[in-house]
Image (cartoon, rainbow, N blue to C red):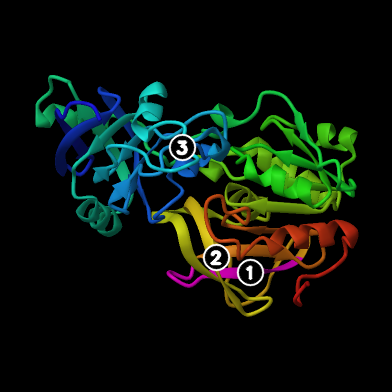
Amino acid sequence: MSEQKSAFLVLDDGRIFEGYAWAKHGETFGEAVFTTGMTGYQETLTDPSYHKQIVVMTAPHIGNTGVNPEDYESERIWVSGFVVRNPSPAPSNWRSSGSLEQALIDSDVVGIAGIDTRALTRHIRDRGAMRVGIFSGVDLTREEMVVRVRKSAPMEGAFLAADVSTKQTYVIKPPANIKTRFKVAAIDLGIKGATPKYLAKLGVEVHVMPLTTTFADIERLKPDGVFLSNGPGDPAAMVEVISMVRSVLTARIPLFGICFGHQILGRALGFETYKLPFGHRGINQPVIDLTTGKVEITSHNHGFAVAAPKESSFNTVYGAGHVTHISLNDSVVEGLALTDTPAFSVQYHPESAAGPHDSTYLFERFIDLMQKPQIPFTEEIE
């Protein structure tokens, strides 16, 4: 562990937490968010959805299992900063190939340790997600640090998916012992590596395509379905992608969206999206599937939600639809489905890396939708 030097976490409402410098020293800015997972910090760090966010871990002891190349969800660490209470001084796990702190230093990620992350989490919970800065080794007064934080960019209106999306299409094929059943165009808005791998195991040849993919590009591929991935930023800023999704719906190509993709489908259907007070992040979020009555423990990372009617079905230019999933914590809409057009979405991560596997059945729903594009989501699908 590096030598302990003072560091400050500064929120844009003026509250300051003092701890010690950890990982890279310097300054960084982003949106302050907390995640409630007790494990999976490496998957969190490498999830592109956390781009431009400073992540607070609510679990007090972080880093004890180190890091390894197998658990990376993308090619790099994306968080703008990392906040922990008690970092492990040495990793201890048979899969570990290095320490968490060194991985953060190698990725130029500024961190802070030794602060009361429970108090910070309660503050964000009560006041809402806000801009934040971490400062270590800088010669600034407290007032100057607050001013610098308040001048940093907010998350509302942010167009961030272009930073994390692939620049060219690549293909994930099913394993050699599994027959290819379908071809899917997966629009990379910040996709996690576990998602195309999971689809491939179900016999799907996944073409991971850039954010700039047009409907004409999709038509040339002739996919059996379109997948919209997770990703960072404000869904209202994704004007071109929303337009492309509307063309997919008009063409009646089966579509499945998760997380950011769920929000984009919602906007394509004509609903507004709105900023949640502090979002849903972690691997223990309870959601009820209204089509089956089952409760799932799910993995989330989102700060926006879709303003769709929960109590009744709705009508769109693509036909009727209804809300399929609801958060049991705050009643936020967590899933949408159309009855007359083959499309559905959920607000969370069914691939759950790391996290529970209660929701992997959603990939089977997508497979079923590609087999029978007219099927309505009004009954349980085995």
Residue designated by label 2: 333
Q: Please state which amino acid type lies under the numbered disc 1.
A: Val
Residue designated by label 3: 96
Tell me which corner region of the image, top left, top right, bottom left or bottom right, holds residue 236: top right
Bin the neighbour count of mark 2 within 10 Å (Cα to Cα): few under 14, some 14-19, many 20 and up. Answer: many
Q: Which residues fall within the magenta stretch?
A: 320-331
Tell me which corner region of the image, top left, top right, bottom left or bottom right, holds residue 290: bottom right
Classify residue 30 as left or right of residue 161.
left
The correct choice, above or below, for 151 with respect to 262 in the image is above
Rendered-image quadrant of the C terminus? bottom right
Q: Please state which amino acid type lies under the numbered disc 3.
A: Ser
Q: Position of residue 325 (x, y in %)?
A: 60, 69
Q: Earlier in the sequence, mark 2 or mark 3?
A: 3
Which type of secondary structure does the marked residue at label 3 adopt?
Answer: loop
Q: Position of residue 184 (x, y in %)?
A: 81, 44
Residue designated by label 1: 323
Q: Earlier in the sequence, mark 2 or mark 1?
A: 1
Classify residue 217 as left or right of residue 58.
right
Label 1 near label 2: C-beta < 8 Å? Answer: yes
Q: Residue at x 75, y 49 (%)?
A: 199
- Nearer the observer, 115 or 223: 115
Rendered-image quadrant of the N terminus? top left
Tell me the distance, in whole angstroms, between the alpha carbons under discs 2 and 3: 38 Å
Is residue 321 on the magenta stretch?
A: yes
Residue 317 visible at all: no
Q: Earlier in the sequence, mark 1 or mark 3?
A: 3
Of all residues shown, which one is farthest toward the bottom? 293
Which type of secondary structure does the marked residue at label 1 adopt?
Answer: strand
- Nearer the observer, 353 or 288: 353
Q: Which mark is residue 37?
A: none
Prevailing secondary structure of the magenta residues: strand
Q: Please state which amino acid type lies under the numbered disc 2.
A: Val
